[in-house]
Amino acid sequence: MKKLLLLTFSLFVFQNFHGQEKKIKPFFTGSFKLTFAVNEDFTIDPDDDQTFLIPTATFFRFGFGYRFGEKFLLSVNGGFDHHFPYAINAFPTYATARYNIWGGTEDSFFIQYSRGKLWRPSTRFSDGDYSNVGLGWQLESGSRWKPLIKLTYHRKEIQGFEDSGNLDSISLGFGFIFF
């Protein structure tokens, strides 16, 4: 009788454990971002072959984290940044907190904040701090791969860089999140 009771209890716990969606769920994320600036050589003349906006930086990001319920996500990220006008390369590593303003696990509009360290591969500038804040939209895709669109303000605090020591930019990014 004890074996039958133990078997029934074990089957009940096993079914309960696998039958419900978990509140904490791991994920991977990646993105590509471009930063644009107004072209100083731009004129209204249609024959001048100058565009109004020119790309000034590219950012590649990868990370992993956990989703807690439907609204809150935490992740650890790393990436590579290249700023064309200054010939600056950097490797930011940072933690991100994301809150879904509306929507849930499938389609959501969110705000996120990140803070971390900026590593420089050359001695031209020292290592610094990195932070960003942004808005984004996670789109429904019908699969575990969810596309992301982000508008993000980045601040890189680099000692000895120009007057303020800050390299600020706003980027438009496209990426994914995989649950």
Image: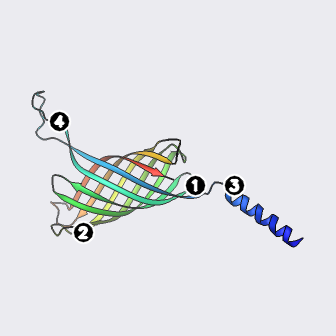
Confirm or deny contact between disc 4 and disc 2 (CB under 8 A).
no
Q: Position of residue 13 (x, y in %)?
A: 74, 63
Disc number lying in front (3 or 1): 3
**Badge 1: residue crowd in 10 Å (few <14, some 14–19, many ≥20):** few
* Label located before the other in sequence (3 or 2): 3
Mark nearer the N terminus (3 vs 1): 3
- The kind of residue tagged 4 is Thr
Which residue position holds label 4? 51
Which label lies toward us, 3 or 2? 3
Quadrant of the rendered structure where residue 122 is?
bottom left
Looking at the image, residue 96 lies above or below residue 138: below
**Gap in Å between the C-alphas at discs 4 and 1?**
45 Å
Give whichever of 70, 20 is nearer the camera: 20
Read off the residue under disc 2: 127
Residue labelled with disc 3: 19
Q: Secondary structure at mark 3?
A: helix
Q: In the rendered image of this protein, does residue 127 appear above or below residue 152?
A: below
Residue type at numbered disc 2: Asp
Q: Secondary structure at mark 4?
A: loop
Label 3 CA crowd tier, 10 Å (few <14, some 14–19, many 20+) = few
Q: Name the residue located 21 percent from the left edge and 54 percent from the top edge.
A: 83
User: 170 or 17, which lies in front?
Assistant: 17
- The residue tagged 1 is 69
Number of labelled discs? 4
Lower sequence index among marks 4 and 2: 4
Q: Give the spatial CA distance, label 3 vs label 4.
A: 56 Å
Mark 2 burial class by Cα count in 10 Å: few <14, some 14-19, many 20+: many
Q: CA distance from mark 2 to mark 1?
A: 36 Å
Residue depicted at 37% across the width and 53% down the height: 133
Element carrying mark 2: loop
Spatial separation of the CA atoms under disc 3 and disc 1: 17 Å
